[in-house]
Amino acid sequence: MHPFPSRAGGAPAPLAARIRAVVRQALDERRLVGAVVLVARDGAPIHQQAAGWADRERARPMALDTVFRLASVSKPIVSTAAMVLVAQGRLGLDDDIARWLPAFRPLLPDGRPARISARQLLSHTAGLGYRFLECDAHGPYARAGVSDGLDASGIDLDENLRRIASVPLLYAPGTAWGYSLATDVLGALIARVHGTSLDRAVHELVTGPLGVHDTGFVARDAQRTATAYVNGNPQPHPLAEGETVSPFEGAVGIAFSPARIFDALAFPSGGAGMAGTAGDLLRLLETLRQGGGALLPAPWVEEMGRDQLTGPDLPTAPGYGFGLGFSVLRDPRRAASPETAGTWRWGGAYGHAWFVDRAQGLSVVALTNTLYEGMSGRFVTDLRDAVYGVGEARR
């Protein structure tokens, strides 16, 4: 399914040529195995491209409707579901989540009880962490057996929450920012408030109303699902079951289970557990960019896109703050970015990046099957610069 109806015209040749050149170079240099790139401006598709292999060893080409393991691209979807509940008056952004999750009671570092709100979960200011960000395999989350939602843990969501809550918070909620399992806790909160499983809640609150059919917590068709690859020399290799790959220096890394997405019994990880297509994601982003439509009232979309942080920039991203579900560009100069202040952006560990520049009417989705090049490698910056024509003569 295409994210938009076909329209007369098409992509301006220079922009299309720039993007195709970036994709081709990444494929030729064996930094990527395959990618789907979609670009929309003012609601119209100006670039749609599937390139490379969905499965290199089986010579299965990438297609516009290829299904990807979304990893943290799950976060804006699940965050939107929470905001729909807020808009319906069923969830208070600043209420104590203990009202709905009374058993989830992580303590402060000094042993005192803590109060956590949905806003703090959405903005990653709740004091939680990630197991894969710990410096070694013996960190507190590892000792507690916490799942980051990307492994074959064999536990359910309630058990994972119990394990998360057994570890002291890293800081008092609301006093700092730290990328974390907060969206997994948010998923449990959504399920409890909505009175269903999380997968059903996300369908009823977001994907169903949007009319998208390929995005959920289980990939139903293995033949449409991209094979995952890991960057390496001389070329990326298929990601093995249980293989640990670290996205950042000094972090222990993620023990991936590529088979998890086909397991209907795996717990629904709100922060990392979904699969979907580039077109489905673009439909969500475009709906939000245009003010939310029937999905979410415009004031709540504005709140999602408002920088919630009052302190320093994100630790590894100068010039960026964070909204409710994704980063928000504070200062293009500090970020060395051609994007407009206020641009939304995030990615996913399986090799994905997306951004929405509302001031320019732009929504860009790039889903790849190659980690971590497609999330944080040169491809991401090259694609951004190609969209904005950085280095091209302005007309």
Image: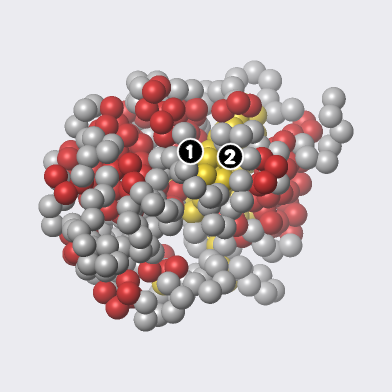
| Structural crowding at the residue carrying mark 2, measured as other residues with C-alpha within 10 Å and reported as few (<14), some (14–19) or many (≥20) | many
Which residue, as the protein is rendered here, is positioned at the far bottom? 138
Q: Secondary structure at mark 2?
A: loop
Residue 8 occupies which quadrant of the picture? top right
Distance of label 1 from label 2 (alpha carbons): 8 Å
Q: Which residue is mark 1?
A: 307
Which residue, as the protein is rendered here, is positioned at the far top? 8
Residue 111 occupies which quadrant of the picture? bottom left
Labelled disc at residue 330? 2
Q: Secondary structure at mark 1?
A: loop
Task: Identify the residue at horizontal 56%, vertical 34% (top origin).
Answer: 342
Task: Identify the residue at horizontal 60%, vertical 26% (top origin).
Answer: 359
**Amino acid type indicated by mark 2:** Arg
Residue 310 in sight here: yes
Residue 351 in sight here: no
Residue in the foreground of this view, choosing between 358 and 21: 358
Labelled disc at residue 86? none
Expressed as whole percent of the image width and height from the top left, the position of residue 73 reads 45, 48
**Amino acid type indicated by mark 1:** Asp
Left or right, residue 57 beside residue 154:
right
Task: Identify the residue at horizontal 23%, vertical 35% (top origin).
Answer: 92
Task: Identify the residue at horizontal 70%, vertical 46% (top origin).
Answer: 336
